[in-house]
Amino acid sequence: MPDTPQAAVPVVGSSITRQARRIYVGNIPFGFSEQEMIDFFNQQMHLSGLAQAEGNPILACHINRDKNFAFLECRSIDETTQAMAFDGLNFKGQSLKLRRPHDYQPIPGGGGVEGAIMGLPGVISTVVPDSLQKVFVGGLPNYLNEDQVKELLTSFGALRAFNLVKDVTSGLSKGYAFAEYLDHMVTDQAIAGLNGMQLGDKKLIVQRASVGSKALLGVPATIQVPGMANMGPGMATEVLCLLNMVVEEELKDEEEYEDILEDIREECSKFGEVKSLEIPRPVPGVEVPGLGKVFIEFTSSSDCQAAQLSLTGRKFSNRVVVTSYFDPDKYHRREF
């Protein structure tokens, strides 16, 4: 073990500070050793510049395999607080949940301000704090996993935090989640785009969590946004809008773009005559309306309805497709 300059890493009598130096790690994957997790976190601490001295910030790891969680023990209080930034970090395919232990009490003057640590770039936190930007997503089919729900939400923008609420004993989704976008400007667009959409045999309810405290109590079934009741994908029109089907990168490549157009036209022709098809493409330096969406115009609304019922919840390049009807006048004016 390399000698650690202790002066650089203040440790106040280890037994007194132990609860302030421990981290609860939930949602852990199966089949790894305690040493593997220690090595992983030590490496991450050094790579992110969060280790405050040479040597290893993580001293020990204790795994509870029955209940699928672990505890990490750090060498200092400050580094424990820094390590909380790894909440949501991917370890062997699982997004880890990092929390303070139940017996945690901040030690006066020892360990920085809790919550002052900003998330690390590219890591989506699993703690969605209560705020006006906290979004409630209800009516999710239980078979959708975290990555699929995240993918649905990120079609509107990057996420700062996300938490799919699961049953403690079975680990299965309870059908609702909370999220916060990195850019608060896209929150309203996401709510407008996703709320009332048909997903499988369910309709999404998407709104700010602060609208009605019922959302926070976990009673999603009774929440209705005024004017949105029973809308689902909306009244059937001749134009269908598909979300979460294409990503910006795919649309940049000319060949790939042509392939996607052909695939979608071929698939949709099974339901009736496709009159026109629009997939907005990215233009450098320009904010393109409707980017990430696919618009299909059918000759009749009944054909469009048949396509909507069949395509909802389907997978395209491993992404779950979300559908809604679109106003034909807006479509012809290219108001995407």
Image (cartoon, rainbow, N blue to C red):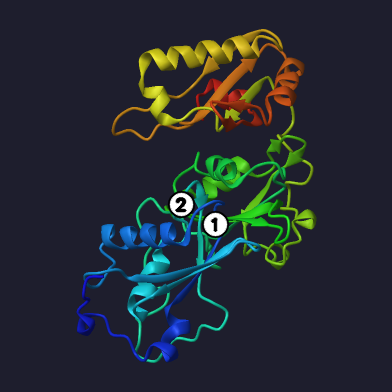
Q: Tell me what residue is drawn at x 71 percent, y 34 percent.
A: 233
Residue 116 seen in the figure: no
Q: Which residue is mark 2?
A: 91
Rendered residue at 61%/30% (across/down): 321
Contact (CB < 8 A) between labels 1 and 2?
A: yes
Give the residue drawn at x 42%, y 77%.
114
Q: Quadrant of residue 209?
A: bottom right
| Alpha carbons under labels 1 and 2: distance apart | 8 Å
- Does dot 1 land on a helix, a strand or a loop? loop
Q: Using the image, tell me which numbered label, if any, was put on residue 28.
A: 1
Q: Position of residue 270 (x, y in %)?
A: 69, 10
Q: Is residue 115 left or right of residue 228?
A: left
Q: Earlier in the sequence, mark 1 or mark 2?
A: 1
Please say if 64 is above or below 149: below
Residue 53 in the image: above or below residue 308: below
Query: Which secondary structure, mark 2?
Result: strand
Q: Nearer the viewer, residue 145 or 188?
A: 145
Q: Is residue 333 visible?
A: yes
Residue type, mark 1 in image? Ile
Q: Which percent across, then down, holds residue 239?
A: 64, 22
Q: How many marks?
A: 2
Residue 268 image point, x, y percent:
64, 14
Mark 1 Cα-neighbour bin, 10 Å: few <14, some 14–19, many ≥20: many
Count neighbours of disc 2 (C-alpha within 10 A) and say few if under 14, some if 14 to 19, many if 20 or more.
Answer: some
Residue at position x 40%, y 63% in the image? 38
Q: Residue 12: which numbered mark, if any? A: none
Q: In the rendering, at what x and y percent does residue 164 appear?
A: 62, 54
**Type of the residue with mark 2:** Phe
Instruction: Identify the image quadrant of the N terminus.
Output: bottom left
